[in-house]
Amino acid sequence: MESPVSRHTALKLLFICTHNRCRSILAEAITNQFGAGRLVAKSAGSQPADRVHPLSLKYLAEAEISAEGLCSQSWDDYESWQPDVVITVCDSAAAEPCPLWFGQSCRVHWGLADPSRLDANQEDIATAFLHTIDLLKHRVLSLLDHDLNDLNAGDLEDLLKKIAAK
């Protein structure tokens, strides 16, 4: 049985999506907005795009969530950051082999539909983006409902999976 790890610093979350232009970006912004000093997030991709999707920025602003400093970047940029948790948010990223340096990180999948790929009218696209933002916000706030300080890696992984299943 794993012993609890006392955590007196913020839990570090790295959100992964293949292109790091939409879902992982939304997750980073939302986590940092609502993390209350207990969570800090970054996002990255295995094949990062050249920029954040403009609709990601638009709908973050509409939801009054800061997009300051967001950019699409490679997961290789975070090798020295040593996240506590790596969360994949797209199915293709979840299926990719992860870098060896993820080895000590708890890994879970929070699968989300990609609102930027929706072939629909503007109203439906807006609804999809705002739904994704609301879902991520709910998951982050659900995580914050728990005492994260003394969870061992297995309990943390179980909690994150339970939150994703809601």
Image: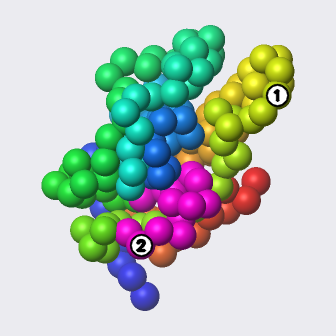
Give the residue number, with chain letter if any, for mark 2.
97
93 in the magenta segment = yes
Q: Position of residue 98 (x, y in %)?
A: 38, 69
Q: Which mark is residue 153?
A: none
Residue 148 visible (yes or no): no
Relative placement, left or right, of 143 versus 44 is: right
Q: Name which residue lies at 51% across and 60% down.
A: 93
Q: Nearer the viewer, mark 2 or mark 1?
A: 1
Q: Earlier in the sequence, mark 2 or mark 1?
A: 2
Instruction: Identify residue type, mark 2.
Output: Pro
Q: Quadrant of the C terminus?
A: bottom right
Q: Name which residue lies at 67% across and 62% down.
A: 162
Relative placement, left or right, of 2 versus 76 is: right
Q: Position of residue 77 (x, y in %)?
A: 22, 48
Q: For mark 2, does the 10 Å Cα neighbourhood hold few (<14), some (14 to 19), or many (20 or more) residues?
A: few
Label 2 and label 1: CA atoms lie apart by 32 Å
Query: In what element is the residue under mark 1?
Result: loop
Give the residue number, with chain letter if any, for mark 1.
120
Q: For mark 1, does the 10 Å Cα neighbourhood hold few (<14), some (14 to 19), or many (20 or more) residues?
A: few
Instruction: Identify residue type, mark 1.
Output: Ala
Q: Which residues are magenta?
A: 86-98
Task: Classify 25 as above or below 66.
Answer: below
Residue 90 sits in which quadrant? bottom right
Residue 83 visible (yes or no): yes
Query: In what element is the residue under mark 2?
Result: loop
